[in-house]
Image (cartoon, helix red, strand yellow):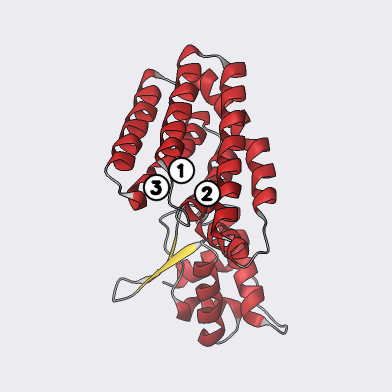
């Protein structure tokens, strides 16, 4: 136990300042970023951390709670509990942006601008890298989307629609694309859930998804880019139309 404390002590330094819990949080976060602790690793217990930082367990507890809220660790209860490092979690960012949208701090136009920048490029990259298995995943999710639209099950349908775009990001293998797409699609799903789509709109969404898949299947980056850009613009117009109808 003593050796373990000494080993971890080399990573951290004692805190002697105001806002102690924040400073502790910053040091632990930096240790995770620098991979002193990796996904799945358990942080030292509160008592040991308090000794390392020369502070109270209350300050340690506050820092750990903040780290959990930020998506860096997960706190488990019980005998074998503690703070465990988790794989990078985009949920805090997603929730924050979604709440900003709900409180009218982020406009639909701002979301459109980001989608126009990101999504056509993602589709073009996917056209270059997609495997037959990736194509099958895309076709499967569009088939499920069509079935859910036909069954009048909007909740699941709204989940299928963003999932299509998220898969495109996964195909690129670019983690930044994946995280940004998760944020954008969370917002998109929230917006979709506010409206009741007519049959024409449902068919248009499914048809355009199929068109994007066709371009990706051919490996045509330019066509994938153009079709995705048109799809994003059309969906934006649909949102505006439905939003005005709700007013």
Up-down relation of residue 245 to residue 174 (above or below): below
- Viewer-nearest residue: 87 or 56: 87
Up-down relation of residue 87 to residue 211 (above or below): below
Q: Secondary structure at mark 3?
A: helix
Indicate the position of residue 93 as horizontal and vertical percent values: 57, 58
Proximity of marks 2 and 1: CB atoms separated by less than 8 Å: yes
Check residue 103 in the rendering and tell me which mark sits there, or answer none: none
Up-down relation of residue 226 to residue 20 (above or below): above
Q: Secondary structure at mark 2?
A: helix
**Residue corresponding to mark 2:** 188
**Residue corresponding to mark 1:** 162
Residue 147 shown left or right of residue 8 in the figure: left
Residue shown at 30%/47% (left/top)?
152
Indicate the position of residue 173 as horizontal and vertical percent values: 51, 32
Residue shown at 51%/62% (left/top)?
71
Q: Disc 2 and disc 1: Cα gap in Å?
A: 7 Å
Check residue 159 in the rendering and tell me which mark sits there, or answer none: 3
Residue shown at 48%/51% (left/top)?
192
């Amino acid at each position: 136990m003593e050796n373990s404390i000494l080993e971890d002590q080399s990573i951290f330094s004692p805190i002697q300042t105001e806002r102690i819990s924040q400073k502790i949080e910053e040091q632990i976060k930096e240790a995770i970023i620098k991979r002193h602790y990796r996904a799945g690793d358990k942080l030292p217990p509160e008592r040991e951390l308090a000794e390392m930082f020369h502070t109270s367990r209350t300050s340690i507890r506050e820092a750990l709670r903040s780290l959990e809220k930020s998506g860096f660790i997960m706190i488990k209860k019980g005998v074998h509990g503690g703070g465990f490092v988790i794989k990078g979690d985009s949920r805090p960012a997603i929730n924050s942006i979604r709440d900003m949208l709900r409180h009218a701090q982020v406009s639909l136009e701002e979301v459109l601008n980001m989608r126009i920048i990101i999504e056509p490029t993602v589709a073009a990259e996917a056209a270059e890298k997609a495997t037959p298995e990736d194509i099958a995943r895309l076709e499967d999710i569009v088939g499920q989307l069509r079935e859910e639209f036909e069954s009048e099950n909007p909740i699941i349908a709204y989940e299928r629609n963003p999932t299509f775009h998220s898969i495109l990001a996964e195909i690129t293998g670019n983690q930044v694309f994946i995280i940004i797409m998760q944020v954008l699609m969370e917002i998109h799903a929230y917006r979709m859930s506010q409206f009741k789509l007519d049959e024409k709109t449902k068919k248009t969404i499914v048809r355009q998804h199929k068109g994007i898949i066709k371009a990706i299947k051919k490996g045509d980056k330019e066509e994938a880019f153009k079709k995705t850009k048109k799809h994003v613009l059309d969906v934006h117009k649909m949102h505006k139309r439905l939003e005005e109808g709700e007013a």
